[in-house]
Image (spheres, rainbow, N blue to C red):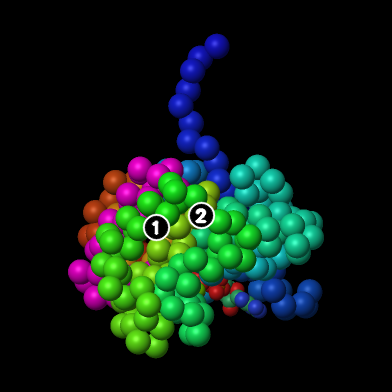
Amino acid sequence: MTTTTTLATAVEMRSVRRIYGDESRPIYALRDVNLDLRRSEFTAIMGPSGSGKSTLMNVIAGLDEVSAGDIRIDGRSIVGMDDTARTVLRRRAIGFVFQSFNLVPTLTADENIRLPFLLAGIRPDDAVEAWIAHLIETLGLTDRLHHLPAHLSGGQQQRVAIVRALAGRPSIILADEPTGALDTRTAREVLTLLTLAAREYEQGIAMVTHDPVAASYADRVLMLADGRIVGEYRGLDPRRISELIIALQEPTA
Ligand SMILES: Nc1ncnc2c1ncn2[C@@H]1O[C@H](COP(=O)(O)OP(=O)(O)O)[C@@H](O)[C@H]1O
Ligand SMILES: [Mg+2]
């Protein structure tokens, strides 16, 4: 028997199809997508507008149904799972970072960070408290914990959302343009933290981005076009990523 080191798979997508519209005018948002997202791996997802990036994130999150195919989260199929079971799995296994922060306006930063634990009925243990404290300090939120989102800058709100997503150490973090509203320095800190979360804390990260510099932090870059994964790359610098994106956007003759 040979020994191979394989990273645990957080998300498996097999022949996933998502068709919108009716039969006479179908819109193919995802066409037979096969994709594995592993723990400890940071994946950037890029592609032109309308290529299916948001649909991909939404079906993994169980926020949208697939038309065909299977999606497994931590080995469990979410296709055909009832809403309650899916919600429980989502809370345990998936962390979200949206472009629009999605903080609860009536809760302080600290309460927002702890909300997923409250919803899941989990009391953070000492190790989790230490991890949350580390995240809060790393992202420079220590003196902002008791502020409401309205009293935080956009960058600070996004950092709160990122701490919230990382706090429960989910198998996979789905991040949709997480650095889109941040200044360069804060964006770099966020990307470094996502890299660290993957490498040191075995979290899988799937990040949609239009920014070649942000994508260059990832272990691999997936290119989506017209509902298909058309490329998978590793070790690309931002310039090469830009070239690939530009090539995808050029109309084919
Ligand atoms: N709810 C919906 N109803 C109809 N068409 C949709 C819906 N959501 C997305 N689409 C279509 O599916 C395709 C992929 O969309 P989307 O996943 O949002 O792409 P991206 O995030 O890459 O811009 C597009 O053609 C879009 O117009
Ligand atoms: Mg989108």
Question: Against 184, is 95 above or below?
Answer: above
Left or right relative to 171: residue 250: left
Question: Against 184, is 79 above or below?
Answer: above
What range is drawn magenta here?
Answer: 177-204
Q: Badge 1, how many Cα within 10 Å: few under 14, some, many 20+?
A: many
Between disc 1 and disc 2, the foreground one is 2
Left or right relative to 252: residue 82: right
Question: Against 101, is 130 above or below?
Answer: above
Q: Badge 2, how many Cα within 10 Å: few under 14, some, many 20+?
A: some
Residue nearest the viewer, comparing 93 with 125: 125
Name the outermost residue toward the left.
185
Q: Quadrant of residue 209?
A: bottom left
Q: Residue at x 40, y 44 (%)?
A: 201
**Label annotation for residue 132:** 1
Q: Which residue is mark 2?
A: 124
Q: Residue at x 24, y 63 (%)?
A: 188
Q: Earlier in the sequence, mark 1 or mark 2?
A: 2
Q: Residue at x 51, y 60 (%)?
A: 95
Q: Residue at x 26, y 67 (%)?
A: 140
Which x, y percent locates residue 20? 69, 74
**Label annotation for residue 168:** none
Label 2 secondary element: loop
Residue nearest the viewer, comparing 121 with 10: 121
Left or right relative to 249: residue 106: right
Whether the residues at callouts 1 and 2 have beta carbons within 8 Å, the answer is yes
Residue nearest the viewer, comparing 227 with 89: 89
Amino acid type at circle 2 is Pro
Left or right relative to 85: residue 75: left
